[in-house]
Image (cartoon, rainbow, N blue to C red):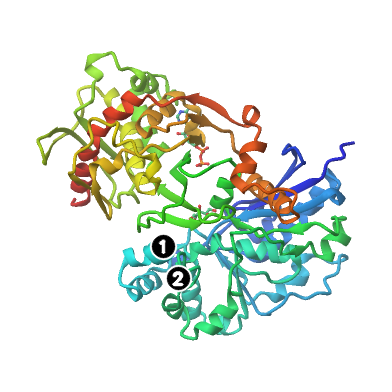
Amino acid sequence: MSESNYYLGFDLSTQQLKCLAIDDQLNIVTTVAIEFDKDFPQYKTKNGVFIKDDGVIDAPVAMWLEAVDLCFERMAKSIDLKKLQSMSGSCQQHGTVYWNCDHLPNDVKPSSNLVKQFAGCLSREVAPNWQDHSTKKQCDELTEKVGGPQNLAQITGSGAHYRFSGSQIAKVHQTEPEIYANTKKISMVSSFFASILVGDIVPLEGADACGMNLYDMEEHKFNEELLSVVDKDTESLKKKLSDPPTSCDEPKSLGTVSKYFQEKYGVNANCQVYPFTGDNLATICSLPLQQNDVLISLGTSTTILLITENYHSSPNYHLFNHPTVPHHYMGMICYCNGSLAREKIRDDINGESTTCDWTKFDEALLDDKTESLFNEDQIGLYFPLGEIVPNVNAITKRCHFKYDDCHVELNDVDSFPDNRLDAKNIVESQALSCRVRISPLLSDEASCAQESKVLGSDLNVKFDYDSSPLSSYAKRPNRAFFVGGASKNTAIVRTMANVIGAKHGNYRLETPNSCALGGCYKALWSLLKESNRETASFDRWLNDSFNWERDCEFVCHSDATKWEKYNNKIRALSEIERAAASK
Ligand code: ADP
Ligand code: XUL
């Protein structure tokens, strides 16, 4: 029997609650997953949520309470919970839970369960889900209050989004005034979960709170003007929000796990609960990411997560405080058109054969010998779905381009001479879009403008709200980590690696449980740090403790010559995006 201690990481996502335990060596010792639709059919959720009229999507909070009990029940059968030293975790971002009390009851009985004892504390049975899109009015009000999307992004790290908590709470206030009046406290899903474990309502977590459109990231406090859109009585609102949120600078336990979990499941009475954060924020904690490292998630959609010290905001992406590394931010860029757009091209190339085989697509990507596959004067946009960055409607656009000194000439074509050119052009333009958008977030140390021959021009190039000299796009991230379905495809990863140009290598990871794992690492490091058994910052500790061989695969170095060649397409990309936006 192992003498090791255990550390728990939870992940309360849309469709399931997962929990992982790790030991002192960071080995995963057990995994438990509760699936909401399957384990709790009585709630009649579909994929974990209720889809209602007018864009409303929400989830029953009682179901989550039941899931917590079931998760501990299964965990207790699998490992000795007396060995638990600490726990943390992550939850779906932006959702809010409404309580009718200032404190949770402290006489919770292990003979009963959480739902029976806590459901009565809720002033609203459901929590808005991040897929909700019913808050346009409130988003407009928030944006207007501070003078437009750029100002809102400058203050809060993001433009107004339907799912963000500020507009959601404002909507509850406006459309359910009695419920709002009866609400004493509001938690985000992350702080709701931690509250249940501690047995009392805890503050919001300082990184997840950036997903509200209410928190001033540079001032480190709620913005009064934005709060006043939600509730004119901003003092009362701050009280409801248990202001201030927890600090991300130093780990601080929220308290020990409540008696309920000690008595019912045998959890160690000294087990500390550390603040829970948002799921994307926990993903960056699952890896030894440092400043200028980038995580590229090639799932159904493409999500880019980046660690940065630069507070360079834009309405087209999101900045959050880093949950564990002081003075750092997490940048998050979400693209709609990822794998599905590539699949369309793959199917076109495969022609009659309807298999999901990527061989021909991959061969085209890696072929730089066949003359008919040269594409240096071609650029394409492949957006079968409307895109977020750039913010344009669904469009597919193929062009040949030519430059003179300060002008780009685009010539539209219906198709390229060989449909395999679409494979090259889609992957390259997806990666180039990512490269130009992460550039402003990379520190100046990442700049290679001096070495880069093709750039060096003072021409200004515009992407979204940014207009910057071409030379400012000659930045290279340190390391790139590829995750998600399409990261299995080496041809796609290699091509993207050459466009993005990470200086210190491109890696691939298998991360089915990355959010929960990030929670485990956060729980362990927080305890070590708070008890003075560790002095290193989270990123350095994880870099040293990480099992690189087991958990990470080196794919390739970026080819610097190829990276430099792609410089030549930056102006063309800007121009084709401008043309697409004017459609
Ligand atoms: P989700 O974002 O829904 O969790 P995944 O991360 O599982 O999705 O990614 C699913 C996508 O991965 C599919 O749409 C598919 O196009 C893509 N994919 C899976 N295997 C490959 C492959 N070998 N080459 C390219 N794409 C792939
Ligand atoms: C991020 C977002 C989603 C949820 C998923 O802004 O809304 O990624 O966090 O759980």
- Asked if residue 560 lies left or right of residue 487, the reply is left
**Could you tell me residue 558's position as x and y percent?**
41, 27
**Could you tell me residue 472's position as x and y percent?**
29, 43
The answer to whether mark 1 is within 8 Å of ligand 2 is yes
The answer to whether mark 2 is within 8 Å of ligand 2 is no
Residues 543 and 425: in front is 543
- Asked if residue 331 lies left or right of residue 352, the reply is right
Residue type at mark 2: give it. Ser
> What residue is at 32 percent from the left and 32 percent from the top?
428
Residue type at mark 1: give it. His
Q: Is residue 352 visible?
A: no
Residues 12 and 131: in front is 12
Q: Is residue 141 visible?
A: yes
Report helix, strand or loop for mark 2. helix
**Could you tell me residue 269's position as x and y percent?**
86, 59
Around disc 1, counting alpha carbons within 10 Å, would you say few (fewer than 14), some (14 to 19), or many (20 or more)?
many
**Could you tell me residue 121's position as x and y percent?**
70, 76
Numbered mark located on residue 570 in the image:
none
- Quadrant of the drawing holding the N terminus: top right
- Asked if residue 16 lies left or right of residue 454, the reply is right
Around disc 2, counting alpha carbons within 10 Å, would you say few (fewer than 14), some (14 to 19), or many (20 or more)?
many
- Relative vertical location of residue 532 with respect to residue 447 in this rendering, above or below: below
Quadrant of the rendered image containing residue 404: top left
Q: How far apart are labels 1 and 2 at the CA level?
A: 8 Å
Of mark 1 and mark 2, the one earlier in the sequence is 1
Residue placed under numbered mark 2 in the picture = 167
Residue placed under numbered mark 1 in the picture = 161
Look at the numbered discs 1 and 2 and tell me whether their residues touch, using CB distance below 8 Å: yes
- Relative vertical location of residue 352 with respect to residue 95 in this rendering, above or below: above
Report helix, strand or loop for mark 1. loop
Residues 534 and 371: in front is 534
